[in-house]
Amino acid sequence: MAAETTNVENVARALKQVAEDGNKFMNNDSAAREKLVASARELVLAAETPVESLLWNIWALPTRTVAARIAVDLKIFETAVENGGCPKSNEDLAAVTGASPMLVKRISRACVSMGMLVEQGPDLYVPNRMTKLLATKEYAAGIIFCFDITQLSFAKLPAYLRSTSLQNPENALDGPFQYATDSPSAFTWLIQHPDVFEAFHGYVHALRQHLPSWTDMYPVQSRLVEGLKPDGDASALVDVGGGTGQILQDFCNDVPQYAGRLILQEIPEVIAAAAGRGVGADGRIELQTHDFFTPQPIRGARAYFMRSVLHDWPDEQCRKILAQLKDAMEPGYSKILISDCVVSDQQAAWQHISLDLYMMAQVSSRERTEREWRALIDGCGLEVTGIYNKGDGNEGLIEVIKSA
Ligand SMILES: C[S@@+](CC[C@H](N)C(=O)[O-])C[C@H]1O[C@@H](n2cnc3c(N)ncnc32)[C@H](O)[C@@H]1O
């Protein structure tokens, strides 16, 4: 009984918080939306019994991930939005792929429980906002990527950790991913699986459209544009490990006044994919094959930008990447700009916690706290000159210089 009394008090407190945050949100305080989501989650936790919470986490969540992945293969989302999103039966949804209507029924109702589809009547479905999102290739790609590559190593992660007497994975060349697959690294695996490779680059770009851009949080005008040397390598913004070029394309649109060179550096397969997407066709963005563990060919650039690059590597490899950049930098002029999560020491955001475990399983790496970033960067003889952030759970921007 005592436990039930406590539970009622907790629910009352959580409800009050939801009401407060909800009122702020409805009174046009847009920053209150995230707080409202967090407090609504707290309310659910307070109202659930511990066993219900446990089953939600270990029973419901994993089955949802696999159901969403099967729904993509069944083309449920694309089909649901066809013909103006008119109501469709299991048979209608199954006809496109020739799947069994019974399979479609079982997966469709799982999609309904995830808010990805609406059940208008028995066995009759209509799309909602999330269906429409998932009907587009880039967003469905998120489901493909998050399942196809990450489940490989998550499935074996506990066994791998037991095999190391429960040590923190820190070896990029011999970690959970190598234990779970016969591939030398997640990057190699991606190249060997072109569909997932395509899904990865499409989805990271699509997601970025919904997050604050690094140029929203970093004073680009005063830190990069002013004082820019007009010609040659010194004028360059180099996107190191820049993926298929969308970050530089966005930069062109967001900061049109940046007159220097824009250079995308990547491994050959990704440079080929960027060229295939037309990046660099108009000459504004230069494509350059470069391995960031080797000497940096662009010397004394205005900035070397890296987004989601260092979080892919344990400290040992990060030090090597940073050493190559340090060697190329002009003191007092060049900057390294690191766009990555800066995890709170306490009450870390759920996004950071999730990404951190992805990094552990895929690449034996981790998301870093401010203290860990500073220790890594100071240890390379470089100096952190600013950490910029916008919103809990997003990526921050760390500015680094080489002292004279
Ligand atoms: C997580 S992705 C980030 C891509 C891009 N910066 C973004 O945020 O969309 C990491 C990138 O590092 C690239 N990469 C891995 N090893 C590399 C190396 N040795 N040299 C250059 N790039 C590399 C990968 O091809 C991949 O595109």
Image (tube, helix red, strand yellow):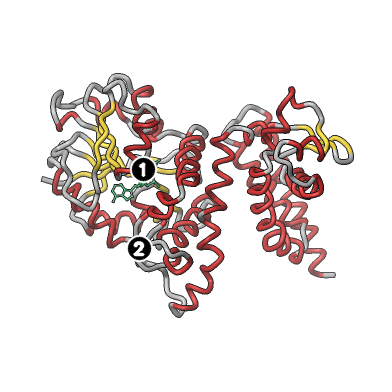
Relative to 302, is 282 above or below?
A: above
**Looking at numbered disc 1 in the image, what kind of residue is underneath it?**
Arg
Q: Dividing the picture into quarters, in which one does residue 374 lie? A: bottom left
Judging depth in this view, the residue of 150 and 235 nearest the camera is 150
Q: Dividing the picture into quarters, in which one does residue 297 lie? A: top left
* Circle number at residue 2: none
Residue shown at the point (13%, 42%) measured from the top left: 331
Q: Position of residue 95 (x, y in %)?
A: 76, 37
Judging depth in this view, the residue of 48 and 281 nearest the camera is 281
Answer with mark 2 or mark 1, whichever residue precedes in sequence: 2
For disc 1, the marked residue is 307
Q: Position of residue 346 (x, y in %)?
A: 49, 58
Relative to 60, is 278 above or below?
A: above
Query: Is label 1 within 8 A of ligand 1 (CB to nearest ligand atom)?
Result: yes
* Mark nearer the viewer, 2 or 1: 2
For disc 2, the marked residue is 172
**Looking at numbered disc 2 in the image, what kind of residue is underneath it?**
Ala
Along the horizontal axis of the image, is 53 left or right of 353? Answer: right
Label 1: how many residues lie within 10 Å, few (<14), some (14-19) or many (20+)?
A: many
- The outermost residue toward the right is 122
Residue shown at the point (53%, 61%) measured from the top left: 152
- Would you say residue 337 is visible in this rendering? no
Q: Quadrant of the C terminus?
A: top left
Label 2: how many residues lie within 10 Å, few (<14), some (14-19) or many (20+)?
A: many
